[in-house]
Image (cartoon, helix red, strand yellow):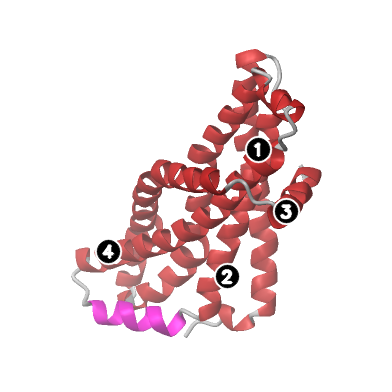
Amino acid sequence: MVLLAARTLISAVRPPYPYGEELVGQFLFVLKLSWFPMTISTFALCLGAPGLQAAGILDIFGNLDRLGGFFVVTAVRFIGPIVTAAVVAGVAGTAITADLGARKIREELDALQVLGVDPIKNLVVPRFLALIVITGLLDIFAIVFGLTAGIATSLLYGEPLGGFWATLFTNALVADLWGSVLMCTLFGGIIAVVCCYKGMTASGGPAGVGRAVNQAVVIAFMGVFFFLYVFTAVLLASNPELQTIR
């Protein structure tokens, strides 16, 4: 997978660039598959645990106006990127693995190499770039719908939205937004490399494609959560102001 990631990065920047049409197709394909489940999942999760449960506790202590600051930590830094990565890996990643796995089983990838066509540049690179771009964009949508769940929570408790917006903008920093989008963008790269690798190395007929899909999802989740830990530790260490509640 490391070798595939290196070759993908080199192929992406080295001319020629024959994958423009495939890149647009993959971008629209991933967007069509992922936007609706991501929207529903983000709103439901943010309305549940950080929304209604946290609001109940804050309401007991008379601090419901602090809910906006709480959503900065949960929706922007964690739930948005995690839900986006989970949906992209579980929906688009499995489709990519199944597609490439089926081509591998039918020996289409070998046929491309015989014809002098590089499968990495023409198949892996467009999927890699599409997932990188789409996960960053979907993370922004996830943040928006996560904050919408926070607004709905405040309204359900009859709380004016002034306190929510005040604590939200007081605690939200530029580093929160760019850190969330950058982390989610790198999630897309991890998912793309894992799913493309498992698809291009599938063997054993249709059953082998099914095993490759299952393995791709598990490995992608493991990679995403490991990278989440490392990235969060580095981000908080390099931006200590993020750990200050205002």
Q: Residues within 10 Å of mark 3 (few under 14, many from 20)?
A: some
Disc 3 marks a residue whose amino acid type is Leu
Q: Nearer the viewer, mark 4 or mark 3?
A: 3
* Numbered label attached to residue 9: 3
Left or right of 204 in this view: 52: left
Could you tell me which quadrant the N terminus lies in?
top right
Per the image, the residue denoted by label 2 is 179
In the rendered image of this protein, does residue 235 appear above or below residue 33?
below
Q: Nearer the viewer, mark 2 or mark 3?
A: 3
> Looking at the picture, how far across and down is residue 66, in whole percent?
37, 77
Q: Earlier in the sequence, mark 4 or mark 2?
A: 4
In the rendered image of this protein, does residue 170 appear above or below residue 159?
below
Left or right of 246 in this view: 112: right
CA gap between label 1 and label 4 equals 40 Å
Residue furthest right in the image: 3
Disc 1 marks a residue whose amino acid type is Cys
Per the image, the residue denoted by label 1 is 196
Query: Tag count in the figure?
Result: 4
Give the residues in magenta: 161-171
Q: Earlier in the sequence, mark 3 or mark 1?
A: 3
